[in-house]
Image: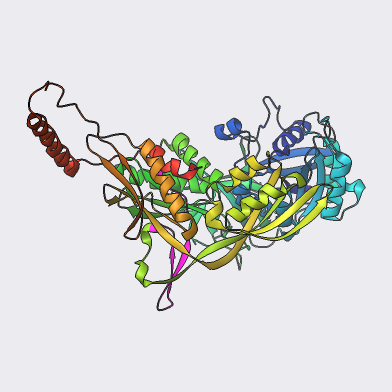
Amino acid sequence: MKHIRNFCIIAHIDHGKSTLADRLLEYTNTIQVTNGQMLDDMDLEKERGITIKSHAIQMEYTYNNEKYILNLIDTPGHVDFSYEVSRSIAACEGALLIVDATQGVQAQTISNLYMAIDNDLEIVPVINKCDMINAMPEEVEDEIVELLGCKREEIIRASGRTGMGVEEILAAVIERIPHPKGDEEAPLQALIFDSVFNSFRGIIAYFKIVNGVIRSGDKVKFFNTGKEYTADEIGVLKMDMVPRKELRTGDVGYIISGIKSSKEVKVGDTITHVSRPCDKAIAGFEEVKPMVFAGLYPIDAEDFEDLRSSLEKLQLNDASLTFQPESSLALGFGFRCGFLGLLHMEIVQERLDREFNMNVITTVPNVSYQIYDKQGNMTEVHNPGGMPDATLIDHIEEPYIKSSVITTTDYIGPIMSLCLGKRGELLKQEYISGNRVELHCSLPLGEIVIDFYDKLKSISKGYVSFDYHQDGFRPSKLIKLDILLNGESVDALSTLTHVDNAYDMGRRMCEKLKELIPRQQFDIAIQAAIGSKIIARETIKAVRKDVTAKCYGGDISRKRKLLEKQKKGKKRMKQIGNVEVPQKAFLAVLKLD
């Protein structure tokens, strides 16, 4: 146990975590790095250049003639994948905090750091990309000293590209990060921090042993579900899985026990022996709080069960995804899914398509509201379709967030006006160092789920970092905006919106749908309504044949007769015709501006 070190790498997006991880793997001769970002094994990760999943890998390193085992977990940097980071932190005793020498401390750096400090991790600060021409290691050192209160000489200057400082990092990991503490004689306690689905071997759970020893062939049980299994194979995680006969306290490894059903493996559960169980489960990590809700519906109704099993398999690999069944009048049966943000939603959609061949329709994202009726009872509504009648509602409360925006002083004005335009209020602003400023705002969550982050980045030319956490519910003047096609309400397009935005939004939605819905043989009326009051209307004109073309001269009544006959046909067609709303229309509502 004295020779084991478990640590993770935490940083803001694009500060070079995965590249530095490559150098560490290369330096410890774990693998030959061929094409960069070796731990990002998903196609999506390579295409977008971001880490989506945490990746655990074991390295061996000889230091002062003693052999050490280093378990490294590379984590994502984007705020939408912060649940991955919190689970990785639970399996470690230390963290490398990486800061980009060209960009300095950013919002996710701070929020990931606090997460690590809450779990009593030893922090090793590293300044990466010191080989860049525009690097400013001196200023960044000042920021880190101010943030951590550490000494200057504790900060390591490194470069993931050239390999500078890698030896110092490995030495710091061994000297500064404590070895795992635990009792090998105690009953087995192992924390599951991740799992994957393998179509041949069932579900593979990744765990860290806190106390005790596990051997291949042991009878084990999962503490929370109470289910019992045989440990068919256990082992450690290198680039591939390497089987071992036994794993001891402090080790990080995997277990295969032929589990087929995804409901039986809960991330955060404790593994223990059947014959000598532990008294209590390890305190896992808190339940995930979804920030954005959207409906996912299969394009063919008979794919509903396939979509359910695809989501269950995906949830094993991405524990921050939550879903429950729901039905919609327009789209049939589907699932109401909770995501941590819009990027997370996009990635889940992409993974469903690539890994499971599921083609899905996504409804407009929204958040959950609390609705109080006249008797004072509260119901939680995720979907505008589930709203009670307006006459029964006393008031509606919507979720608010506290956000911190870090930017340079040049962009304060536009960012403030964006926040105020989204019904936000400015709480305070603090100057961090030089010309960098941190704005604290309170904003309704419903206003930021759709396009707030994209606008923020374009206003500030990308020099901004944004982080937020939930801040309770507050009463608000919200109304339900319905979209009607030929008098029929389309529940997938209805939204809850603030009174002040309703007219403008209704008008823009009607104009947008007029462009996107193809013309039919009959007129289509697109209307936006609040309750029974129509507030905007557009008409898509019918495609019509010129029936009077063959009439030259002659009496007007002849032409009128032909036009009346055509009108009757159009009316009959309107009664039986239905309007197809293309998938583009559902997504275009998100990008109204």
Residue 13 at x, y percent in the picture: 68, 41
Residue 241 at x, y percent in the picture: 61, 38
Q: In this image, 42 relative to 506: left or right?
A: right
User: Is residue 559 shown above or below 472?
Assistant: above
Residue situated in front as seen by the camera: 499 or 306: 499
Residue situated in front as seen by the camera: 519 or 240: 519
Q: In this image, 572 relative to 165: left or right?
A: left
Residue situated in front as seen by the camera: 384 or 196: 384
Q: Is residue 230 visible?
A: yes
Residue stretch rendered in magenta on the structure:
359-384
Number of callouts in the render?
Answer: 0
Q: Is residue 182 visible?
A: no
Question: In terms of image quadrants, where is residue 30?
Answer: top right
Residue at coordinates 44% horizontally, 59% vertically from top-left?
382
User: Is residue 71 shown above or below 285?
Assistant: above
Residue at coordinates 29% horizontally, 44% vertically from top-left?
525
